Amino acid sequence: MKKYSKLIIAAIVALIFIGTFVFLWQKSQPKEIVYSEFTPKTDSILKTTIITGKIEPRNEVNIKPQISGIIAELMKEPGQYVQQGEVIAKVKVIPDMGQLSSAESRVRLADLNLKQAQTDYNREEALHQQKLVSDDEYDKVCQQLRQAKEEKAAAVDALQVVRDGVSKSNASASSTLIRSTISGVILDIPVKVGNSVINSNTFNDGTTIAIVANMNDLIFRGNIDETEVGQLVISMPMKITIGAMQDLQFDASLEYISPKATESNGANQFEIKAAVSVPAGSANGTSGSLRSGYSANAEIVLARAENVITVPESAIEFSGDTTFVYVVKGKENGEKAQYERKQVTTGLSNGVDIEIKSGLTLKDKVRGPEIIADDAEK
């Protein structure tokens, strides 16, 4: 029994040894190199570039107050549409004490002048009725009374403007009411009720009450590398894709290329601007519509070749300024494939396929990259 057990163990060891030897022998044998093969085809080659940027209104208008004061009321909110002349906010005037004192003094002086003019008029009128003064003298006194009344009214208006920011005579044109100067969407209201605001003057730009823009007039603003800017021309068509609206694509037209580069991460970049064609209803400021500052990508076709012979660029062998392909030969009747190295003239490439200007026909077949064993098994 022990004898048979020893024989079985010896047989198993021998089989393992033989199997290992055969496996190593097979692995050491040279494998046949297999290449992928491609047939040239007629296609169109487009060389494109993608520019990253953002969407923004062509013009954003800062609405500023005409007087200094405190925000008393806000009638609008960001995102709402306003018409030109529509009230956005109301300002409560905090009068300047020097101006207020001067305006009050002017009213008092005008009142004194008016009383004196009224007294003179009453005296002249009595004498005129008695035919003791001429019509010319009487007319002069009447004129002085009218001027005194007008001066009193102007002084009162000036006092009301200094004290309240508006007078009764021109309440409809009150400078305390902050109105939009254009029709558009309110992008931002950077102030709150109770904030102090100042009007624009020689020493400062004034406080911005609201930012309003026409969202139907949008531009794409981005930067392009110096290696590609030379291929751009004004009015080139572009396709705009917005990150937040992947299912929509907008047409655009290039309208500006900066004449001066700016350095970014060690590379020279040139700013470009393109007018975006906005479909109706896409920029009304409501939820889901275009918004200022959206990140976007612009695709520009830099060059194109229509209906040309193309092959995958991986089938091309580059040697200096010369390009070659390996044309398949002698594969009929099960023969092993033979490859003939042939010079070709290439043209436009899109990074995947490349144009063949001469050296190949549609009847040829070219060798591609080597097929790796793992890929072949898959």
Image (spheres, grey):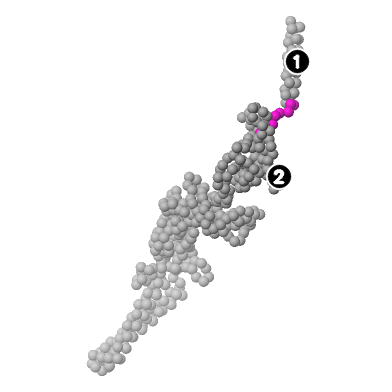
For residue 133, what is the image quadrant?
Answer: bottom left
Of 214 and 210, the residue lying toward us:
214
Q: Residue at x 66, y 41 (%)?
A: 316
Q: Is residue 30 magenta?
A: yes
Secondary structure under tag 1 reads helix
Q: For the N terminus, give its image quadrant.
A: top right
Marking on residue 348: none
**Residue that badge 2 annotates:** 319
The residue labelled by disc 1 is 14
Q: Amino acid at mark 1?
A: Ala
Three-letter code, disc 2 = Ser
Q: Nearer the viewer, residue 314 or 55?
A: 314
In the rendered view, tell whether residue 46 sits above or below residue 34: below
**Residues in magenta, as a range:** 28-35
Along the line of sight, which residue is nearer the eye, 327 or 198? Answer: 327
Q: Residue 292: in sight, yes or no?
A: no
Q: Is residue 63 visible in the rendered structure shown here?
A: yes
Could you tell me which quadrant the C terminus lies in? Answer: top right
Mark nearer the viewer, 1 or 2: 2
- Neighbourhood count class around disc 1 (C-alpha, 10 Å): few under 14, some 14–19, many 20 upward: few
Q: Earlier in the sequence, mark 1 or mark 2?
A: 1
- Position in image of residue 256 (x %, y %): 54, 59
